[in-house]
Structure formats: C-alpha cells, structure tokens
Amino acid sequence: MNFYTEKKIHQGRAIEVCWFGYRGNGHVLRSAVPALRKNKLNLSIISDDLVTVCDYGNEDYKPNERWTRWNLETCNDEIIKSDIVIMPGSTNPKFKYKSNNKIVASWLLGMPVAQHSEDLERFLDPEVRQKEADKNYEIAKRDYEVKLSVEEYKKVIEECYGRRKAG
C-alpha cells in the first residue's frame, strides 16, 4: 500500500474520467462514449501504447480525449488528475476472469470507479464522489492488504504440505 501515497480530494463538477489498461483492451471504451458525451466528460487514457476512442469509430470525440503512456513512476499522478475512473465491462469471455486489481488501485488513490452510465451520472457531484471514494478507500485498506494474501498463501501451503505428509 506504500505505492499509493497520493489520494484525490474531490471538488467541483466532474469534467474528466480516466481509463487505464492495455491497448488491446481499449475496445471497451466504445460502450462508454455515449455516456461521456451526454455528461460532457473528457477522457484520459493511460495505456502501454496509443489508443483512442477514435480507433473505434468516434472520430469527432478526439478533442475530448488525451492519451498518456503508462509509466510506473507517474501513473498514480495521472489517474488522480481525473475525477472518476471508468471500468466499462465487456461481453468478451476473457473478461469474465479479470481481477479487480485496477478497481482496488483506484480506490487506494481515492477515486470512485464507474462501471455503468448510472455511476457516471451520480459521480458528477463532488460530494457523492468523495463519499464513495472515502468508503471504498477504507474497504481497500481493510480487505486488500498484501499481508492478508500472504497469510492466505501460508494456509494453503500448510494444508497442501499436511495432505502430502498424511498421504
């Protein structure tokens, strides 16, 4: 958790959302464009390679987006420049097994995460964003501490070792 030293303080109506991920998954942004337009939100894309929503047939949205190359040293600062993190879903079967790592990372930065257009509309309000961010920050700290995973792994190893000895 030492990697997440900055935490967003939410003020004013939301003006920009952020998506971060691999370029190959950028197609999920297509589904978010109508809600971004409706709510007059700009889009920050942080990715390993250039990806824009224009790549997916939304050329007129280009003035409303910016792309930044993902970099471990600067990614957190880039994410909290925005007001909301978006994580649109996908019907692609491989997405069924994606972890919630990006959601938890966003929570630790004090960012609300919108997965649906209704979330975007709620999070336009700074008080709603801050309340959501504060609630999820506490959940992330409590339930996703790395030390908890270490303890779980130890238990699994001990169980496996015990079965091996007994068998």
Image: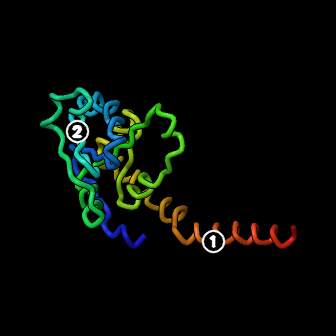
Horizontal and vertical percent position of residue 59: 17, 29
Query: Which of the labelled discs sits on residue 115, or is there none?
Result: none
Instruction: Single out the mark in the foreground, 2 or 1.
Output: 2
Looking at the image, do the residues carrying marks 2 and 1 touch, with CB atoms under 8 Å apart?
Answer: no
Residue 93 pos. (x, y %)? 51, 35
Kind of residue at badge 2: Thr
**What residue is rendered at 66% in x and 72% in y?**
154
Which image quarter holds the C terminus? bottom right
Q: Kindly report the distance in space between the C-alpha atoms of the residues bearing marks 2 and 1.
A: 41 Å
Query: Residue visible at 32% across and 49% down?
Result: 20
Residue 38 appears in the figure: yes
Q: Position of residue 40 (x, y in %)?
A: 21, 34
Q: Is residue 17 above or below residue 81?
A: above
Disc 1 marks a residue whose amino acid type is Glu
On-image quarter of the N terminus = bottom left
Colouring method of the image: rainbow
166 horizontally vs 117: left or right:
right
Callout 1 secondary element: helix
Q: Measuring 73% from the left and 72% from the top, which residue is drawn there?
A: 158
Looking at the image, which residue is at 34% across and 38% down?
A: 120
Residue at label 2? 52
Q: Choose the circle earlier in sequence order: 2 or 1.
A: 2
Callout 1: few (<14), some (14-19), or many (20+) C-alpha neighbours within 10 Å?
few
Asked whether, in this view, residue 48 is left or right of residue 161, the answer is left
Res. 14 visible in picture: no
Direction from residue 139 to residue 4 in the image, left or right = left
- Tag 2, which secondary structure? loop
Q: Is residue 75 above or below residue 25?
A: below
Q: Position of residue 164 (x, y in %)?
A: 81, 69
Packing grade of label 2 (10 A; few <14, some 14-19, many >=20) is many
Residue of label 1: 151
| Residue 58 figure quarter | top left
